[in-house]
Image (spheres, rainbow, N blue to C red):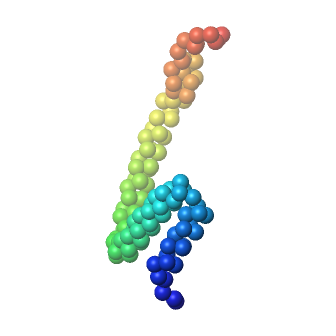
Amino acid sequence: MPDLGPWEILIIAVVILVLFGSAKLPQAARSLGRSMRIFKSETKGLISDDDDQPQTHAQPQDARAQAARLREQAALLEQQAAAQQPQLSARADDGTTVSGVPLSQTEPGKKS
């Protein structure tokens, strides 16, 4: 690769200035700076992800324990719902409730 002297660098700078214009160069520099910061942070994120891999082996046990707790909660809720079902059915038949929700006066503007 040939070495670039000061004259070659100056010619390249003038060509870039003519092609892009002086107004767009600061915007392009800011955009390039943002892109470099994002790239740098993503690279650090990838490196830190490699460091976190040994910890991921312990997570399935935590997930299994949490899933077991959720199943227990779901079973308890199903039992409570089954216990409430006869009460809800009895209330729905008397005409003052619908599915266990008390009927109130009709809303304004609606005819009953």
* Residue 15, percent from left and from top: 58, 69
Q: Name the residue: 53% across, 15% down.
A: 104
The foreground one among 86 and 97 is 97
Q: Residue furthest front?
A: 7
Question: In the rendered view, would you say 67 is above or below 103?
Answer: below
The answer to whether one can see residue 59 in this image is: yes
Q: Residue furthest right?
A: 111
- Total number of numbered discs in the rendering: 0
Question: In the rendered view, would you say 67 is above or below 47?
Answer: above
Q: Name the residue: 54% across, 68% down.
A: 14
* Residue 77, percent from left and from top: 43, 44
* Residue 51, percent from left and from top: 34, 74
Q: Name the residue: 56% across, 24% down.
A: 98
The foreground one among 49 and 5 is 5
Question: In the rendered view, would you say 72 is above or below 92?
Answer: below
Q: Name the residue: 58% across, 10% down.
A: 108
The answer to whether one can see residue 38 in this image is: no
Please identify the quadrant where the C terminus is shown. top right
Q: Residue furthest bottom?
A: 1
* Residue 89, percent from left and from top: 54, 29
Question: In the rendered view, would you say 60 is above or below 99?
Answer: below
